[in-house]
Every structure is written in C-alpha cells, then in structure tokens.
Amino acid sequence: MPKTKKRPRTTKEIGKLINKRYKILRHLSAGGQGIIYLVQDEQSNYPSFYAIKQSRQDHKNSKFWTTIDTIFNSLTQEATDITFNRSTQEAAILRDLTQDGVSQIPCYENYFKLKQEYYLVQEFIQGKTIKEILHTVKNFNEFQIIAFLQDVLNILIRLHSYYVTSNNQAMYHRDIKPSNLMWQEDKGHIVIVDFGITKYRGFVDLKNEEIRQIRTKRKRLSQNYHLFQQRQYDQMTETEDEDETGIMVTGGVEFCGTPPYAAPESWVGNVYPSSDIYSLGVTAIEALTGQAPSDTLTGQNPNVDSTINKYDRELISNELADILEKMIDSKYQERYQSAQEVLDELEPLNAVGNVLKQRYRIVKVINYLNQESFYTETINHTYIAIDTRAFSQQVIIREFSPQSQDIEVLQEARHILDTECQKLEEINRLNIAIPRLLDYFSEDSKFYVVYEIIEGRYLSQDVFFNQELKQNWGEQQVIQFLKEILVTLDSMHNCDSLHLDIKPSKILTTDQSTVY
C-alpha cells in the first residue's frame, strides 16, 4: 500500500526574525508536536544560538489519533487546546529543571506567544540522535549498550525524583525513543530532548463520577483493545511519519507516546516510572540489534510476556539479556520499579563503581559512542572518576586493553605506556596548553592514564555555527589560532611526542581564551 503524503506544514522563511529577536538559520525538524528551528539571538552581545519549537494552538493531531478518538467518542472539551497546554507545560518543566541545575536536558531560555502560535526557546544541542547514529553504525556492542543505559537512567533518576513544590508531583518523560535521545559528542554523553508530553504525577484531575465512567469504559473495551491497537498501529505506519508522537484523550484519560516504544499500560492512561524504563529497554534492544522493535520483540501485550528473540540474546551476556527482558516486561508490576534498581543491576557489568589503585572511583562512562569507539583494534574506554585523595576532584581516566592477553604483548604495552607517559610528564613541566597528566598505572592487565578535566568550547562548535552563519574566520584570527596550536605542537615534537588525532572536536578554548 503506497504511503499517504504527509500533510503540509507551515514553516517560516530562513532569515526571518521571530519576536523581532531570533533570526531563523535553518529548519531542524517538523513532527507531531510542532516545528523546530535553529536560530541566532540578534539581541545578544556575543553569538548565541538556540532551538525554537513552534506550536500552533489550532494544530490537529494525526489522522491515527483522530480515528482513535472517534471510535472511543469521548474527547473532552478541555483537550481542544491540547497543543497549547503541552507547549506551556514543556516550557514550565524545562524552566524548573534548568533553574535547579538538572544536567543532560536542554536548558530553558524563553517562552512567548505570537498570535495563535507558541514558541519555546531552549538550548540548541549540537549532535546526532540515536536514531541517526544507528543509520550509520547499525548497532551497538554490549559495552556501549550498558554505558548507554547507565547514561539515560541517571537522567531518569533526576527526572523521576524531581518534585514540584507547589503540588508535590513528580515527572515522567513518556516518550523515550531513539529520536529523543541526542548524543552530544563534545560532552561525550546523552541529552534527553522533547519534554512536550512529559507528565507530572497526578497530572489529570478528575471528579469521582468521571473516574467511575472511565473504569467502566476500560472494562468494556478490554476484550477487543489489543486487536484494535494493532490494527490502528498498522494503519499509522502506512500513512504517518514512523517517529510521530501520538496523543489520545478519552474522558480525561490520555495516551501519549510513540508505538511501539510506549509501555502497554500507557494505552489505558496509566503511567509509572517503569513506563519510561520500558521505553528505554525497547530503545536499547533496537540499538543492540539495529532492527525495529516490532522485528525483535515478541509479546507487546499486557497478557503476553515480552522477550528478546533467541538469536538476539546470543549477541550479549545472559546478565544483560535478563536485565533488558525485565525492563520490557509487559506487566508493569514485574518490571524494575525505579531507574536506580536498573542501575544497581547493571553495576557489576562494567567498571562504573569500581575503585582503581585504591584511589579513583569511576562514576561514569563517556565518549562511548564517539566514532573512534566503533572502529578500533584496541579496546579503549574513557571514564569520569573521583580522586578520593584529592578533595574528591573529578578526573578523566583513559583505559587501554590489548586484544591479546599474551604475556609478551602485555609487557610491550606496559613499556609503551611508561615511555609515552614519561614524555607527557616532561611536556607538563613546560607548562603548555594540554591537559595535565596526573597519573598512570596498570591493573588486571589493563592500562590507565589519568588527566585533569579542561572545561571550554570545542572548535567543532565554532565550525558548525560558522557554517550556519555562512561566515569564515578572518586572516588574523586564523594566524592567532595557528600560533597558539603550533607552540603546543612544537613543544610536544621536541619531546618526541606526537598527537596523531588533531581535529576540531579535539581542540577547545577555555573562558580565559586559552586554546587546548
């Protein structure tokens, strides 16, 4: 059956100002929840770039969701302005989370209404979505899956435990999926985006009579619900963008999410911390196999156990497979009830939580999806760790492990480590702009190098925005940049040391304008 053409969307022209302030540089995306632009703040004293999400008050949801509502015949009057409610809620959520310093989400900047359109201004996250990465690399290995899960689960812990003091309500994201998880390469971690359908616990306020009617309706529909769900999902995939988020409101009960990432209980208006865990589990299995969830899972139905296909289980350890299966259990009561529970189960599977040299406690894996992590003959990982002997200072630890465990190979690796690190110690004494080598050692046939953390802006960011603005560096700026970099390289070369990986994502400028 040929796909139906998507409905035309009204987009603003490149170069146009929004609210007499934000200049549109590019259309980033358009989906069920609105249109997103990359913009430059023309009122800022220095180059400032943001993402603006535009939502229309009279926006209609997709044909799929309209069909569902017609069948249930119970759309409330209050839902007619659902896009405005969601846009306002997303702005409030990002504002609160930003003010409280919650990391790995887009920072809130501004929110306003123009005519019948609503605009949320937020931090622009430079990077690729997990969906985009999977188009290139096809699938992740077990180490990457574990690190990915730990990364997102740590964000969910903060989100699920975040309470709004005015009503003591917590949050759920409700739309965890590959296209809502951004890989921020310069930071080496995941950022969760699109909080348009995030829900405060207890968000729906219903009268007792409404609740009774809803329960009666659920019972009446329970027998044919799953057949209906599959039929409508099949219809949607034929006519709509496969990544479009759906919203259904029936008698005050709403379903939000993206089939097949949404947990089964979401279809009858229920949401729990384990609902986000389910969606994350489905996403992780897609990343592991490189295949759509409908091709890798069996039993996306509350009455049938969800399991990973036997072939796909062979890709990973039994321990990880068991964790993933519990994350996607169709019965929410049988799943992990909190993100922390999943983290506790994952901890023995990689180095997070380990203490190296009785000193460095590893707290996080970073850079695990950078390009060099996919194509290398040497096993190497990067961690953030706490130096327990240096006032709990955070440090970077690089781990190297030869593929071969032959004694001669390990001895040669140790010799190379000693030689190169001695060169770095010599370079450190020259006081040039490279991260200081703090320590190096071997443990359990693995080799570790400890560096200080340098905060700053990567050259890759400047290159990206210069391309968007169609601007180039001037001659003097190029000369100054080369002088600073060449001073560092000259000192390294005089110590018989080579970098071998110079590129924009490896060069940063600090707030003091020092180039590293």
Image: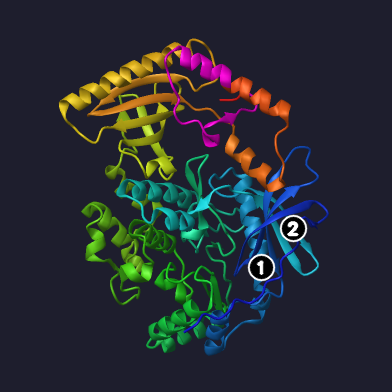
Name the residue carrying label 1. Answer: 85
User: Quick check: 140 left or right of 54?
Assistant: left
Q: Secondary structure at mark 1?
A: helix
Q: Which residues are magenta?
A: 486-514
Q: Position of residue 422 (x, y in %)?
A: 37, 14
Is residue 336 highlighted in magenta?
no
Which residue is the extreme one toward the left?
407
For image coordinates 61% across by 56% down, the residue present is 93
For image coordinates 33% across by 60% down, the residue present is 289
Q: Marks 1 and 2: in contact by CB < 8 Å?
A: no
Q: Position of residue 177 (x, y in %)?
A: 46, 61
Name the residue carrying label 2. Answer: 14
Q: Is residue 150 above or below residue 476?
A: below
User: Quick check: 122 left or right of 135?
Assistant: right
Q: Position of residue 440 (x, y in %)?
A: 35, 21
Amino acid residing under circle 1:
Asn
Q: Position of residue 473 (x, y in %)?
A: 70, 34
Q: Quadrant of the C terminus?
A: top right
Q: Secondary structure at mark 2?
A: loop
